[in-house]
Image (spheres, helix red, strand yellow):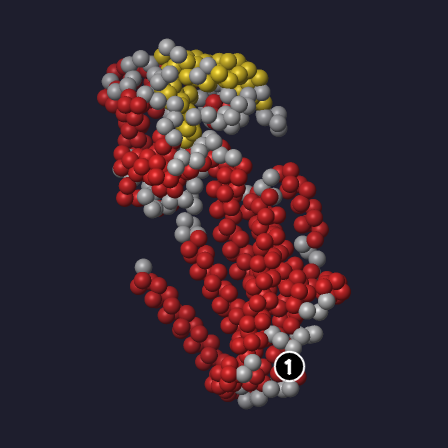
Amino acid sequence: MSGSEKKHKLSYLIAALILIIVWNAVSCLINSPAIPNPYVVFLSFTQQLKQDLPQHFLISAYRVIYSILLALSLAIPIGLSAHEKRIDSFVAPFIYLLYPIPHIVFLPLIILFFGIGDLSKIILIALIVFFQILVTTRDAARSVNEYYIYSLLSLGATKKDIYKHVVFPFVLPKILTALRIGVGTAIAVLFFAESFATNEGLGHLIVDSWDRADYPSLYAGIVSMALLGFILYSILEFVEKRVCRWM
Amino acid sequence: MTKAIEAINISKVYSNGVKALENVTFSVEKGESCSIIGPSGCGKTTLLFIFSGILKPTTGKVLIDGSEIDKPRNTALILQDFGLFPWKTVYENVCLGLKIRGVEKNKQKKIVEKLLKDLGLQDFRNSYPKELSGGMQQRVAIARALALNPEIMLMDEPFSSLDALTREKLQNFLLELQNKDSITTVLVTHNIEEAVFLGKKIVILSPRPGKVVKIIDNEEMGDVEYRNKKGFFEKCREVRKSISLVI
């Protein structure tokens, strides 16, 4: 077990190394200040760490994590309830009509109602992630094999037991997969949401450095944002491994 | 002798118009083992679901211990697939019925540990079903049923996905269990040898909608050696003949 785990980690290290080498090669070939080599970016990154980069990072992390939690707390109950055919026949048309809309276009409305502060950003990200998780959760909740339920009913289960012992554990791996995809989307929207009307966050740092043509700083922002995504993704993978041992 | 199960003229028509059962009448005595055999799709499973209280017959009634059932009672249902929950360990699966019935934790542990030991599963308590062989899985399903100390055990083709050798082993195991605990059992199968080996009473159903074609008494069964006796083969022939008349 630990042997394969070590190999696993090693292959990640090798992949990271190859990416850095390719990056370095491209930077040498193109030889433009717009593509600094990894070492310069690393220096800029460590230097910025002493300045306000950690703060930007934390604010971005706060926004994106809150958004995901908000999306989850709404999408999971609604998605799970689709297991009841009666509820699903009510909810399904709404999902069908609302899901295909590019929700980012609601930005002006959200700002109109919730101002230009953190709340608007969180709501915008949550809105988009919400639908991704909802659609997956609903599909999974509807596909629970009824024999599992019969089996549980024969043990004298109540409705609550069915959700607790069958529907939720069955759907959980699918929610986690949706979340992993959702994290990518969430950070993309985060960048968009932070690119205006704020002085904080990695998105702001990137756009601001861009304006100032401060490429090392710009790259430090990009690397931080990538790191944020990577950390969230790793956490999810860790949780998934723990929770879905049975798969 | 008192009757554990009494099916009186039951018919079942599903909401989609499929007629599963028609005027089924038979009874199973307390402590008796009964095999129900018939072609695929003859409503055998429906019949078990009705006995367990999960489904209601469209007309007619079922008496369990002399009274009509309105919700799942102290009956245990063992299904071919989907009986065990893949997301629960062996221990959790066996424990589930007790948990749902609100049995105290310490007592749960005592009952489950003893069962796991009796069924030779103690080394697999933390395994997930997919890590077990088919025979092992069905043993877990039986353990879960027994954990509830049921008066009636209903089995829906419990061994049909097992290889011949494992199947025979589990049949012997079940027979010994019946002899020891004299639990009333109803076993649905489409295997003639299995029906004869395990059923003191053999109920033959017709193709859909299932009707009772014949009830054959099988007084000689009850011993593991029965499988090798002349009477066994003759009984199998008798059952086969009755079935061939209706298919």
Relative to A211, is B144 on the left or the right? left
Relative to the observer, which residue lies in front, B19 or B86?
B86
Relative to B112, is A226 on the left or the right? right
Relative to the observer, which residue lies in front, B245 or A242?
A242
Whether B91 is drawn above or below A175: the answer is: above
Relative to B85, is A142 on the left or the right? right
Whether A101 is drawn above or below B21: the answer is: below
- Give the image location of residue B162, x and y in percent: 35, 35
- Give the image location of residue A71, x and y in percent: 61, 57
- Give the image location of residue A73, x and y in percent: 59, 53
Relative to B191, is A143 on the left or the right? right
**Judging from the image, what secondary structure is the residue with disc 1 in?**
helix
Quick one: quadrant of the N terminus of chain B? Answer: top left
Residue beneath the point at 63% across and 86% down: A213
Whether B24 is drawn above or below B158: the answer is: above
Q: Amino acid at mark 1?
A: Asp
| Residue B162 visible in this rendered orientation of the protein | no
Looking at the rendered structure, the number of numbered marks drawn on it comes to 1
Whether A23 is drawn above or below A70: the answer is: below
Chain letter of mark 1 equals A
Residue beneath the point at 61% across and 79% down: A205
Residue tagged 1: A208
- Give the image location of residue B126, x and y in percent: 33, 46
Residue beneath the point at 41% across and 28% down: B76
Relative to the observer, which residue lies in front, A7 or B125?
B125
* Mark 1 surroundings: few (<14), some (14-19) or many (≥20) residues within 10 A: some
Residue beneath the point at 51% across and 46% down: A168
| Residue A90 visible in this rendered orientation of the protein | yes
Q: Could you say which quadrant of the image residue A211 lies in?
A: bottom right
